[in-house]
Amino acid sequence: MATVLYFTLSDVNSFFAGEPAQKPGSKSGANHPSNALLGKWNGTMKVGANAVPMELNLTRKAGKWNAEAKFDMGTEVVSNPIENLEIVQGDISFKTEIGGAQAAFKGKLDKDKLKGSVEAFKNDRKIDSGTWNLERSKK
């Protein structure tokens, strides 16, 4: 007798993203470990002596992750497209342009905080590095 396995589109997307498939009977990946990252996060990015307010909004639609990041530079709020977004369970990485530099973010969910490192590059040369530390928005 052959065993038949059924997979949802979410399971297939998770597999190709390096994430475990859902347990049988779970609904739309609602309990998926990565879903703990969903929502709006606020905090600070620190590079050198500079601390910049940062907002990260993570959404997921039809198994596809989307992100928007905003940085309050004092005179303006900068928000450029997110590139190379990768989310696997509680780990996240992405790139975006800030002030003419390509910023590469790597982070991890740590209880109720999302934090990690950032490296800034110009002309493929590392020009600076720092950290970022966010908490889930209460709004």
Image (cartoon, rainbow, N blue to C red):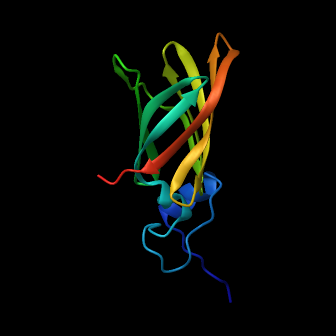
Residue nearer the viewer, 113 or 36? 113
How far across and how far down the image is residue 51, in percent? 50, 28
**Quarter of the rendering occupied by the N terminus:** bottom right
Q: Is residue 103 above or below residue 19?
A: above
Q: Is residue 45 above or below residue 133?
A: above
Question: Seen from this angle, which residue lies furthest top?
Answer: 123
Q: Residue at x 48, y 31 (%)?
A: 82
How far across and how far down the image is residue 94, in percent? 56, 35
Q: Is residue 30 above or below residue 96?
A: below
How far across and how far down the image is residue 24, in percent? 54, 79
Question: Seen from this angle, which residue lies furthest front?
Answer: 49
Q: How many marks?
A: 0
| Left or right, residue 139 beside residue 73 | left
Q: Residue at x 55, y 70 (%)?
A: 22
Question: Seen from this angle, which residue lies furthest left?
Answer: 139
Q: Residue at x 45, y 41 (%)?
A: 43
Residue nearer the viewer, 138 or 51? 51
Q: Residue at x 48, y 54 (%)?
A: 37
| Left or right, residue 47 beside residue 71 | right
Q: Quadrant of residue 18?
A: bottom right
Q: Quadrant of residue 76?
A: top left
Q: Is residue 7 above or below residue 111?
A: below
How far across and how far down the image is residue 78, in percent? 39, 23
